[in-house]
Image (cartoon, rainbow, N blue to C red):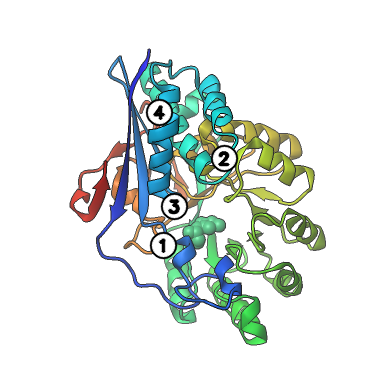
C-alpha cells in the first residue's frame, strides 16, 4: 500500500458562538497587566482536518486543533513530501522521518501537533485496511466500557454552576471537572471565590463523585502553594495545570506538597517530554492529547512509560484519537468528555466537524468492535457554518 495524497484543510467556525465572559476560566495570560479577552488563549475556533489517501482507496482521517493554519502549512510544505509514496503501515519509520526532519524547528508545539494529525490518519488507514478498530491494533479491550468525566463547569454564577453539576448527576456521570475563574492577581477575594465555587459544586455532587479542578496554567507556584491546603477538604481527584507547562520543577514541588494529585501534560509533547515529567515526579496523572503529543504512535509509547511509573493516563479531551488508546491501555482508567453544546471555547467543534464520537450512557462510552479504523467520518451537517481553507 502506498500513500498517494495528503489533503489538509482548515475548518474555521463562522457560526454563532457563546460570547466570552470575564473570569470564565483562569489562564496563563491572567497574570499580565492586559487581561483583555480572558478566553482568548484557549479558544479553538478552527481545526485542521487531514485526509491521507492511498493507492488502494483507503482514506485515513487525522486532525489537529492547535494553530490550524500553521499546522496546515507545516503539513503541506514539510510533512506531505515525507510521507508521499510511502507505506502507511511503516508508521514508526514515518513518525521518525517526520520528527527527525523537522527537529531543528519542530519537537514541540504546532510542529508536533501537525505530525500528530498525519500519524492519526495512518492509524485510521491501518484499521480500515485490516478491518479492525484502532484499539484492536493497540492491544484490544482492557475494560468493558470507558468511564468518562463530564468536563465543563466554567466559572459562572454559582447557582448556574450548581444547576450544571446537577445535570451531569442526572445523566449518570460519576466524575466532573470544573474550572477556576480567579488567580494570583485577584487577591484574597478571588481566592475566596475560587473556594466558594468548589464548595458549591461539591455540595451538589456529594462525596461519592470525583471532582477534578482545572487551573489551565492560570496560577503560579506561590498562589498554588497557598491554595492547595485550602482545597484538601474538598478531596479533589486532581488539581490540573496549576502552573505553566514549562515550570516542571514547580509541578514537582506541588506534587510533593499535599495529597492532592497534580495533573498535567496537555501542553507536553512526545515520550521525551513525558519521561522528564515522570522522572521528576511532576505529575500524578498524565493528560497528553493524542492530536498534539505526537499522534497514536507517541501516545502508545507514553502509555507504556506511564504504566512502568504507575501513573495513570487520562488524556485531554475525549474524542476518538484518545478513546482508542484509553480502551486499549490498562494504565488509562477513564476519559474526559466535553458535553456537546453551542460553540464556546471550541472544544465542541469536534462534534460539528466529525461524526462517530460515541455518546456517554450513564457516564460510560463504548467503542464498536466492528467499526474499522477510528470510526470517524466528516460531517456535512454544518459545512455552511465553516470557512474551509483548502
Ligand atoms: O479540558 C481541559 O483539560 C482543558 O484544558 C480544556 C481547555 O479548553 C480549557 O478548559
Ligand atoms: Mg486541562
Which residue is located at x 37 percent, y 34 percent?
Answer: 76
Which numbered circle lies on residue 138?
Answer: none
Which numbered circle lies on residue 362?
Answer: 3
Which numbered circle lies on residue 80?
Answer: 4
Q: Residues within 10 Å of mark 2 (few under 14, many from 20)?
A: few
Q: Is 96 situated left or right of 238 in this image?
A: left
Give the labeled residue for mark 2. Answer: 105
Number of on-image labels: 4
**Contact flag, marks 4 and 2 (Cβ < 8 Å):** no
Whole-Å distance between the Cαs marked 4 and 2? 17 Å
Whole-Å distance between the Cαs marked 3 and 4? 42 Å
Q: Nearer the viewer, mark 4 or mark 2?
A: 2
Q: Is residue 331 above or below residue 186?
A: above
Give residue 328's quadrant in the image.
top right
**Looking at the rendering, in which quadrant would you find the C terminus?**
top left
**Looking at the rendering, in which quadrant would you find the N terminus?**
top left
Q: Nearer the viewer, mark 2 or mark 1?
A: 2
The answer to whether residue 360 is visible is no
Give residue 39's quadrant in the image.
bottom left
Ligand 1 within 8 Å of the CB at mark 1 = yes
Q: Residues within 10 Å of mark 3 (few under 14, many from 20)?
A: some
Mark 4 or mark 2: name the one nearer the start of the chain.
Answer: 4
Mark 3 or mark 2: name the one nearer the start of the chain.
Answer: 2
Amino acid at each position: 500500500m502506498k500513500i498517494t495524497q495528503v489533503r489538509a484543510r482548515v475548518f474555521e467556525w463562522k457560526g454563532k458562538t457563546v460570547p466570552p465572559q470575564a473570569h470564565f476560566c483562569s489562564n496563563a495570560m491572567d497574570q499580565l497587566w492586559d487581561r483583555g479577552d480572558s478566553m482568548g488563549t484557549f479558544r479553538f475556533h478552527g481545526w485542521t482536518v487531514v485526509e491521507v489517501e492511498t493507492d488502494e482507496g483507503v482514506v485515513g482521517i487525522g486532525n489537529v486543533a492547535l494553530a490550524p493554519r500553521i499546522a496546515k502549512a507545516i503539513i503541506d510544505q514539510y510533512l506531505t513530501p515525507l510521507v508521499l509514496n510511502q507505506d502507511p503501515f511503516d508508521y514508526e519509520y514515518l513518525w521518525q522521518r517526520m520528527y527527525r526532519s523537522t527537529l531543528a524547528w519542530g519537537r514541540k508545539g504546532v510542529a508536533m501537533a501537525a505530525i500528530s494529525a498525519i500519524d492519526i490518519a495512518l492509524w485510521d488507514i491501518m484499521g480500515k485496511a485490516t478491518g479492525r478498530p484502532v484499539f484492536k491494533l493497540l492491544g484490544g479491550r482492557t475494560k468493558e466500557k470507558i468511564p468518562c468525566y463530564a468536563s465543563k463547569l466554567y466559572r459562572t454564577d454559582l447557582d448556574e454552576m450548581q444547576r450544571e453539576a446537577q445535570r451531569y448527576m442526572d445523566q449518570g456521570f460519576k466524575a466532573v471537572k470544573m474550572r477556576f475563574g480567579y488567580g494570583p492577581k485577584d487577591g484574597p477575594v478571588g481566592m475566596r471565590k475560587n473556594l466558594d465555587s468548589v464548595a458549591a459544586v461539591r455540595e451538589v455532587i456529594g462525596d461519592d463523585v470525583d471532582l477534578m479542578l482545572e487551573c489551565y496554567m492560570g496560577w503560579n507556584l506561590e498562589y498554588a502553594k497557598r491554595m492547595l491546603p485550602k482545597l484538601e477538604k474538598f478531596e479533589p481527584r486532581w488539581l490540573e495545570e496549576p502552573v505553566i507547562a514549562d515550570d516542571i520543577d514547580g509541578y514537582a514541588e506541588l506534587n510533593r506538597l499535599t495529597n492532592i494529585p497534580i495533573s498535567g501534560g496537555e501542553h507536553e509533547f512526545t515520550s521525551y517530554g513525558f519521561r522528564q515529567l515522570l522522572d521528576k515526579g511532576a505529575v500524578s496523572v498524565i493528560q497528553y492529547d493524542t492530536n498534539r503529543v505526537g499522534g497514536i504512535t507517541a501516545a502508545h509509547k507514553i502509555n507504556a512509560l506511564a504504566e512502568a511509573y504507575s501513573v495513570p493516563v487520562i488524556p485531554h479531551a475525549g474524542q476518538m484519537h484518545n478513546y482508542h488508546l484509553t480502551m486499549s491501555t490498562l494504565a488509562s482508567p477513564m476519559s474526559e468528555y466535553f458535553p456537546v453544546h453551542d460553540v464556546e471555547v471550541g472544544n465542541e467543534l469536534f462534534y460539528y466537524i466529525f461524526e462517530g464520537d460515541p455518546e456517554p450512557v450513564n457516564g460510560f462510552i463504548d467503542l464498536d468492535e466492528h467499526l474499522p479504523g477510528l470510526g470517524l467520518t466528516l460531517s456535512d451537517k454544518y459545512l455552511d457554518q465553516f470557512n474551509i481553507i483548502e
